[in-house]
Image (cartoon, rainbow, N blue to C red):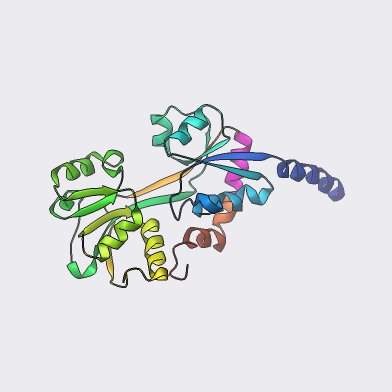
Amino acid sequence: MLITLLFLALPLQKAYSQQKITVALGNTLPPWVMAEDNTGIIPDLLHATLGAQGYQLQFVYVPYARRILLYNENLVDVVSDINNKVIEANQMNGYFSDIAYNYENFAFSLAKRNFDLKSIAQLKHHTVLSWQGAKARLSPEYRDMAKENPNYSETYDQSTQVRLLYRERYEVIQMDGKIFDYYRALITKHGEVDVSEPVQRFALFGKSPNGFLFHDEALRDRFNESLRKLKSTEEYTRIINRYTSKSH
């Protein structure tokens, strides 16, 4: 009986290894996605789940909004950075995975400033540098703060946010915690700016849980099973923190 089961399993594994899965990701957003070498937290999670089952993964890197269009037009099998709000807003159909990762934006300031930020509204009293599009994509409270703050700016280059915080050009920067840690480690490695000064990070925005949307229910189920196993090991934590350690 065991031999029979083994022979049944082998063709199934072979079938998976021959099956190519296309995944729509946003453009490069270190450390979450790094298109130049198909690495980053999100690609690594997919390799450790679907890739480990023998699927061939093909990543399609597109401007952030276009990934939704590719999925809705059935041009890809899977799309990343999905939650219920995104599904409802874009009238998407498919099979939503378990939560695979969390984004979380913070307000960062140098610790020596000794700020006590308890609300988004307080940011209007400080010079703030955020990422491009934050005003349009975050909450109405954030949008109101940005409109009322004459010293609010946005930039496409998130490494610039970190540099200008440490150069004291801005009192506060607003960005994802993993992205901040990645660029601070990278700047330290290259010795561009002294980033040894302690910072405060204010959790004013809450976590944004995200997963993947699949056209195929069975594939979603296999991903969920593999993800649950991965989360029960230290490898999941290593993947999440791989690109943000000081040694990177």
Q: Which residue is found at the position 18% from the left and 61% from the top?
A: 116
- Residue 41 coordinates in the image, percent (x, y): 50, 54
Question: Relative to 114, is 55 on the left or the right?
Answer: right
Q: Does 112 sit above or below residue 158?
A: below
- Residue 27 coordinates in the image, percent (x, y): 46, 44
Question: Relative to 169, is 205 on the left or the right?
Answer: right
- Residue 153 coordinates in the image, percent (x, y): 22, 49
Q: Which residue is found at the position 13% from the left and 47% from the top?
A: 150
Question: Relative to 94, is 116 on the left or the right?
Answer: left
Q: Does 201 sit above or below residue 246?
A: above
The magenta-colored residue range is: 217-226
Nearest the viewer among 127 and 229 is 127
Nearest the viewer among 6 and 133 is 133
Q: Which residue is found at the position 18% from the left and 41% from the top?
A: 144
Q: Which residue is found at the position 86% from the left and 45% from the top?
A: 4
- Residue 140 coordinates in the image, percent (x, y): 23, 39
Magenta highlight on residue 218:
yes
Report which quarter residue 107 is drawn in. Answer: bottom left
Q: Main secondary structure of the magenta part?
A: helix
Nearest the viewer among 232 and 27 is 27
- How many numbered callouts? 0
Magenta highlight on residue 212:
no
